[in-house]
Image: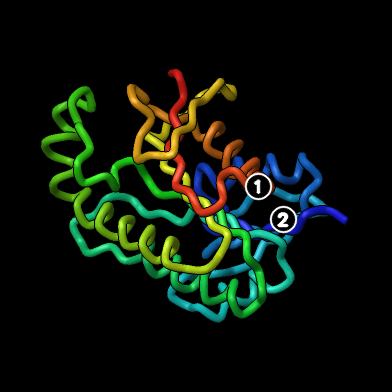
Amino acid sequence: MSLRIVVFGANGPTGRIVTKKALAAGYSVTAVTRHPDRFGQQHEQLRVVYGDVYEPSTIAAAIEGQDAVLSMVGVPYSWKPITVYSQSATAIIDGMQAAGVRRLVCTSSGGTNPDFDLRGEGFFFSCILKPTIGRTLYQDMRLQEQIVMGSDLDWTIARPAQLVTHPAGTSYQLKEAYVVPGGRRTAYTDLADFLLSAISDERYERKAIAIASPI
């Protein structure tokens, strides 16, 4: 019997790659998105369903019967308060506990480190973007991490660096930390690869893992 996984944020750049890789690996995938009609992938092992983290019943319904949960829910930077990360963590954990599902792999960011040394990130990011419109996003990401870490689930948090498109996978580096020293970028395909591999790797359970690609 193939592994049954549910992917939240399936229509985002990482989610689409995760879904494609999971199907290629023989998994049964439930892809959750607010816009199922815009999800272009089709496969006999793929089910695409509507879900919104602000409608917890839709999240719980998608989790029922799964073996593991992967969450790549995210939003762009904004001046407005951001709550989607903490809200998704709460809704997903509640749904998992109700369904008896224990394995959770989710994404956060190395930028959640309040002491992160931004030298080398560039003036725009370090001096303008993160301290202003990035502030509410990273605050909510930190709250997401606190909620996940405070649960009794078998969780793994992935902390990528700046996410970029790259044509192929790399020999990416991992470290149980906020960031990989010297690691400035993470390829979407590398992040997707780690998220899927972490599902069945007990070494990463109840750990937050930084991931960086040599690009």
Tell me: residue 183, above or below residue 59. above
What amino acid does circle 2 point to? Val
What amino acid does circle 1 point to? Thr
How far across and down, in percent of the image, does residue 109 sit? 37, 44
Q: What is the number of callouts on the image? A: 2
Which type of secondary structure does the marked residue at label 1 adopt? helix
**Residue beneath the point at 14% across and 45% down:** 131
How far across and down, in percent of the image, does residue 164 sit? 43, 30
Q: Residues within 10 Å of mark 1 (few under 14, many from 20)?
A: many
Tell me: residue 7, above or below residue 176. below
Which residue, as the protein is rendered here, is positioned at the far right? 1
**Residue beneath the point at 59% across and 22% down:** 168
The numbered mark, 2 or 1, whose residue comes first in the sequence reads: 1
Q: Which residue is labeled 2 in the image?
A: 29
Viewed as shown, does residue 116 lie left or right of 105? Answer: left
Q: Residues within 10 Å of mark 2 (few under 14, many from 20)?
A: many
**Residue beneath the point at 35% across and 40% down:** 178
Q: Which residue is labeled 1 in the image?
A: 19
Labels 2 and 1 touching (C-beta < 8 A): yes
Viewed as shown, does residue 178 lie left or right of 1? Answer: left
Q: How is the image coloured?
A: rainbow
Front in this rendered view, residue 183 or 73: 183
**Residue beneath the point at 27% across and 50% down:** 77
Viewed as shown, does residue 189 lie left or right of 80? Answer: right
How far across and down, in percent of the image, does residue 122 sit? 19, 26
How far across and down, in percent of the image, does residue 182 sit? 33, 22
- Marks 2 and 1, how far apart at CA: 7 Å
Viewed as shown, does residue 158 lie left or right of 129? Answer: right
Tell me: residue 99, above or below residue 83. below
Question: Which mark is on residue 179?
Answer: none
In the picture, which quadrant includes the C terminus? top left
Which quadrant of the structure image shows residue 113?
top left
